[in-house]
Image (cartoon, helix red, strand yellow):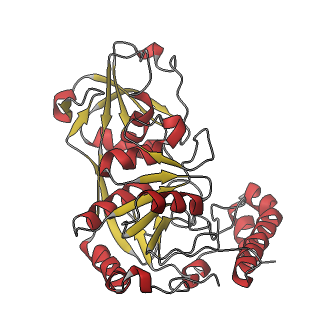
Amino acid sequence: MNHLLQKAWASRNWLAYLLWPAAQLYGLAVQLRRALYHSGFLQSQRFRIPVIVVGNVVAGGAGKTPLVMALVKHLQAQGLQVAVISRGYGRAGRESLEVKTDTPSDESGDEPGLIKRATNAPVFVASRRTDAMLSLLATYPATAVVVSDDGLQHYALQRDIEIAVFDDRGVGNGWMLPAGPLRESWPDRKRQGIDLVLHSGQKPAFEGFTSSRQLADHAVAADGSRFELAALRGRPLVALAGIANPEAFFTMLRTRGLTLEKTIPLPDHYHFDNDDLTDYAGQTVLCTEKDAVKLFSMPNLAPRHLLAVPLAFSAEPAFFAALDTLLAPLLSTPLSQLPLVHGHQIT
């Protein structure tokens, strides 16, 4: 018996054991897809501009978007014209669209809207990131660097730097979907182009750079007014989160000494309706910035006191130093002289 199967049997993980054949088929499909891109049977497009892809090999959120925003701000601080592309998960359309600060979240997706508000960088969404790139460069031809929010598995877009993000789950049981959380095998994927590994959790499962995530000292209302978290202590509060790990948000709130009378964990990218919060009218409701992108723009919002609590994210300085080292040779070469074959090749 395969050692992973033995492990499943020993741990009595019956569901994973039963899904093992499906995981094997999924892994073969992933390998075939990579081979088709590597052979040129499936086309992969190269742009004459450095592309940084931030993603993960584990299904579900792991902290990609906070890192994307931190990267954009880091590069902007160096005077670079930076832009962001994204699939815009959960949005209604598939066409290429520039995200503005007032773009409805159902048109842009919640995360692209959050990135736009946080960085004011050009943000484009499309079901195919190559289409987003074409629209972006047609509108902002002087763009120097593009950051892709997610897209490690979007091989139709070639890239120069790949960053994989992991939270405290690490690689879980180490199995491919659906028996485990992996979209691609690990550490095999690391040897196939991953340049930087960043851990967003408190307990890194293996080697890589570290980062910290903590709540800001204040919350923000829809009109922009601020409320210190310390002033909310002792009040009965309601907290909701439509993110990959809602409990992490609730735990951080409690760590700040807040009393959560009720918590509402919701699926990631949850689509809110106007009556979702009717039962909490008149109460103080705390949410994440990602949820606020949708909630703050909703008409007839039930609760009078809805507050978003920003997340303060920071990667260790060594991470940014390593990124700068990788990016410098690309930026030192005039864009017109960059060969079409620079960067990662699909292997």
Task: Tell me the quarter of the image containing the N terminus.
Answer: bottom right
On the picture, is 192 further left or further right than 222?
A: right
On the picture, is 44 further left or further right than 274?
A: right
Q: Nearer the viewer, residue 321 or 126?
A: 126
Q: Nearer the viewer, residue 202 or 63?
A: 63
Place of residue 23 in the rendered image (x, y in percent of width and height, measured from the top left): 76, 65
The residue under the point 81% across, 62% down is 22
The residue under the point 58% across, 59% down is 131
On the picture, is 139 further left or further right than 107?
A: left
Task: Tell me the quarter of the image containing the C terminus.
Answer: bottom right
Place of residue 299 in the rendered image (x, y in percent of width and height, measured from the top left): 44, 18
Q: Nearer the viewer, residue 94 or 112?
A: 94
Place of residue 43 in the rendered image (x, y in percent of width and height, measured from the top left): 70, 74
Q: Is residue 23 above or below residue 126?
A: below
Residue 163 visible in the picture: yes
Place of residue 38 in the rendered image (x, y in percent of width and height, measured from the top left): 70, 82
Q: Is residue 55 above or below residue 194?
A: above
The residue under the point 27% across, 79% down is 321
